[in-house]
Amino acid sequence: MSDLGQRLEELAELGLERRTRLIEGPQGPQVLLDGRPVVLLCSNNYLGLAAHPQVRQAAAEAALQFGVGAGASRLVSGTMSVHRQLEQALAEFEGTEACVLFGSGYLANMGVIGALVGSGDLIFSDALNHASIVDGCRLSRAQVLVYRHLDLEHLEHLLAQHRGRDGRRLIVTDSVFSMDGDLAPLVELVELAKRHGARLVVDEAHATGALGPGGRGALAAAGLEGEPDAIVGTLGKALGSYGAYVCASAETVRYLVNVARALIFSTAPPPPAIAAASAALDLMQRRPQLIGDLHLAAGTLRRELRTQGFAAGDGDMHIVPLVVRDARAAMALCEAAIERGIFAQAIRPPTVPAGSSRLRLTAMATHTPQQMQSAALVLREAAMQVGLDPTLIGEPARMALAASA
Ligand code: PMP
């Protein structure tokens, strides 16, 4: 057996092998999964805009008007009128002077982190930051200091420990953490960054279109519009498309355009995807009730899960992690739920820390209360089928409470 085959076998033995699953037809609250109709409970298409008629129309029209590919990187001949228009709209939306589009959120984090710090500099990064931030930190060649998740005291301790050292410093955080659905202490992070002369980058991937007035994100919800040195957002989640952006001061954006390698050395995002995101941004701002619907759906899901005995909280954040702990058990629960028509992919290491494998459920504005009710019931039945106790499956905060009670 080759070394690759051997490694694959090891992964399978640990319950960590991954494979793609096939969705036929458009994305929605219900999809065809490997030929079977299921309620989709693990998509980041939070507002259901990925297949909205007006968003599809915008993509189709852009394809006809501009073609499919941008043909080159942004700095050669890949900046087209659709890119410029969306950049202007996003800067206004985020309350910053300027914006620059990237190919994806992964690339945006690579680009912005690597541009703002380098060898000899310091990064302070939350332990549960998204992999694209982790990889951006590694690639930057700065020294990375990881602070315990949401732990401001630990962060301050690390900042103080390295006070007086030469080099730039950068604090970087998700605003809504992708796998836990909890919020970074943004007000305190802005204050700490200022006090310690650090730059602050906030990744709003899961907050744009889901939190704050008009979907302006967790920063806007906390009254911090324009405060961080750079805001990263993706077009691939609530905005239903593909691509990403960084919003910042005009000077910072000018700097990124000159220095961010992920921008300079990658083809500009395709015009239909950008036009679709523009249409989605427009729709979202004209229909704020979509965001209300998302939180109603999330609240209903949690209520139904509690009714079925799961240790779900009572909030209305759209990400609802049900921690099972063991990777194989999480996978078994996921498969048993799919058999019964509910699709919530099991999330395992390295996406989450070892021993915290989970089903990461996500609500969509377009889910019905009936879908949430039947999802919770099915998850209970599936848990029983694979020998798991629903009361021992739930959200991290609840699980910690249960453990310390
Ligand atoms: N940041 C966070 C917090 C994310 O969750 C993700 C995607 N899961 C990304 C960045 C990457 O965004 P994209 O999918 O546009 O590459």
Image (cartoon, rainbow, N blue to C red):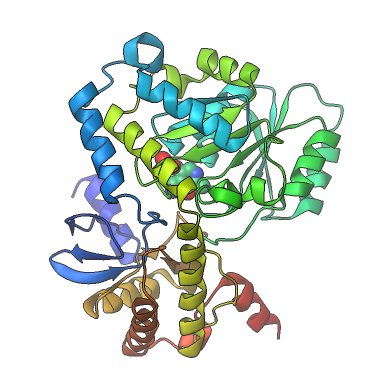
Q: Position of residue 237 (x, y in %)?
A: 41, 48
* Front residue (pair 65, 174): 65
Q: Residue furthest left?
A: 35
Q: What count of labels does the image hold?
A: 0
Q: Residue at x 34, y 83 (%)?
A: 374
Q: Residue at x 44, y 29 (%)?
A: 86
Q: Residue at x 51, y 20 (%)?
A: 260
**Residue 340, above or below 396:** below
* Front residue (pair 16, 34): 34
Q: Position of residue 283 (x, y in %)?
A: 41, 46
Report which quarter residue 316 is drawn in: bottom right
Q: Is residue 180 visible?
A: yes
Left or right, 308 with reference to 144: left
* Front residue (pair 59, 116): 59
**Residue 126, above or below 73:** below
Q: Is residue 118 visible?
A: no
**Residue 8, above or below 253:** below
Report which quarter residue 375 is drawn in: bottom left
